[in-house]
Image (cartoon, rainbow, N blue to C red):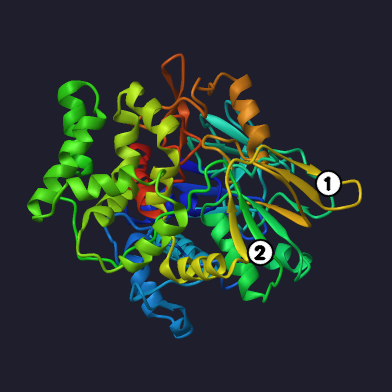
Amino acid sequence: MHIGIVGAGAAGVAVLDALAAAEAAPGAITVFDGSPDVWRGRPYQPDIDAVRVNAPPRVMSLRAGDPTHYQRWLDGRDDIAAYTDEALGQTLVPRGYYGRYLEDTAQAAIDRLRTAGWTVSVVRERVTGFSRGAADTVAADVDGSQRPAARHATLHTEGGGRVAVDRAVLCVGNGRPRDHYGLSGVPGYVNEPYPLARTLPEIAPDAHVAVIGSGLTAVDIAAGLAGRGHTGPISFVSRSGALPFVQQRPMDLALRHLTREAVVEVARERGAVSFEDLVGLMRDELADLGAEFEPFAAEILSAESEPPVERLRRQLAAVDSPHPGLRLLTMAIRVVGPVAWPLLAEADRARLRGGHFRTINGLSSPMVPHNAKIVLRLLDSGQLRLRPGVLKIEPRAVGGFTVFDSAEWTADAVVNAVNPPAYTTPRESEPLVSALLRARAAELHPAGGLSTDPLTRRLLVDDNPDPTWHVLGNLAADSMFIATNPPGLAAEAAHLTRILLGG
């Protein structure tokens, strides 16, 4: 068995780690990635300290069934004492540190696989195409030896290489941000803000900065500017002006009713899962803990109507709230969401996608109190303002930009903080996806992304599974419309590994 893993970000690391944990006859694995910082993906490149991991260690483990894996890695480091979030009582390191965790996890998995007899190769090139049938030869490992191949597909790399595999997994992550206002190339406009270590130094300290969006990326930018001593105004321009939820101090909680197994069982009995089914399971969770459902529901339903600054202030004061509802729901979105989403009735998916995107996204990735306090301080001082109802942004002939919302006003710099929409093909992966579509190994789903079988994660064409290709992450049409988090990726990777090794 020769497995190709296309992409070496968090999803690719999760597959490697799951394969290393499986007890299976050894074969070969080839990982392909052309990025300069392999294993880190887009979110976890080296960056400034203000760009923090936005979740406690217990919900950042990339090892399925082992929620303390990341915490144990942190415990082995002596350079993280300065990154304790006092409100949470948790270590929240810069995201570049989490990238080191991914690197170490990948290398440990490779070492374990090689010890078990697997051949593991890392090709530092993108896969740009593929063909059916066998290649004449394929490099076995770094020693340059070659052997005959008779495989289901041959992967083509940008450097002209050919690697034949039995199974291939697309782990290519999300696309790049879109330029919604056609500003690319205009001086003072930043379309891709990360790494902030590269983009923020280009902004004058007294510049008026318009940040497109008001989610976590916007919070990162505001915290990063504040950390650099920025003195100019900062404006979050967006349609709603809503800010993310504020994370609460962790409790020792475990899902007992709203579990992956329970959701699958409901789908097996009824053919699909309804939103009402999920609400009922959440009610059962709270009832077991003696917690009321109605205040929790009211908190969720008011997310897009309560004035955002009042909400931010109130949620910061409730970091130690004894009610477990928000903590449980965040856990469920992260761990159960990837399984529940493809099993939901399409009408419910459309309702949640269309009407509650901001709420679900804000719940799944809440602000850490450390950054929430910075945002509130900037808001209270008047340096940061929220500008909902943005209509358009245009460059000015004399430099800078005009922003149109309920008024017309000017900014010196514009930074895009709107993440790419779900199911967006990364630019670097477009040649491969185009090749898959031409070869009828994949098809585009009407809702976006590539059609997949929810049980095997195989690519589908006319409801027929492809013999070679699987997909992990947000390129799958039935994945959630928010970025899959590490525990969700780990659980999906463990399930996919069983499929890969079982047939």
Can I make out residue 129 in this image? yes
The disc labelled 1 sits on which kind of residue?
A: Gly
Q: Quadrant of residue 73?
A: bottom left
Q: Is residue 164 left or right of residue 305?
A: right
Extreme front residue here?
407
- x, y percent for residue 161: 69, 42
Q: Relative to 177, does residue 461 appear above or below in the rendering?
A: above
- x, y percent for residue 71: 35, 71
* Nearest the eye: 369 or 101: 369
SS for dot 2:
helix
The residue pinned by badge 2 equals 196
Q: Choose the circle earlier in sequence order: 2 or 1.
A: 1
In 3D space, how far apart are the residues under numbered discs 2 and 1 (Cα atoms)?
18 Å
The disc labelled 2 sits on which kind of residue?
A: Leu
**Where's the C terminus, which quadrant?**
top left
Q: Is residue 111 left or right of residue 162?
A: left
The residue pinned by badge 1 equals 185
Q: Is residue 288 left or right of residue 241?
A: left
What residue lies at 44% left-to-right and 62% top-to-bottom? Answer: 54
**Where's the N terminus, which quadrant?**
top left
What residue lies at 52% left-to-right and 27% top-to-bottom? Answer: 448
Q: Relative to 34, does residue 86 appear above or below in the rendering?
A: below
- x, y percent for residue 320: 27, 69
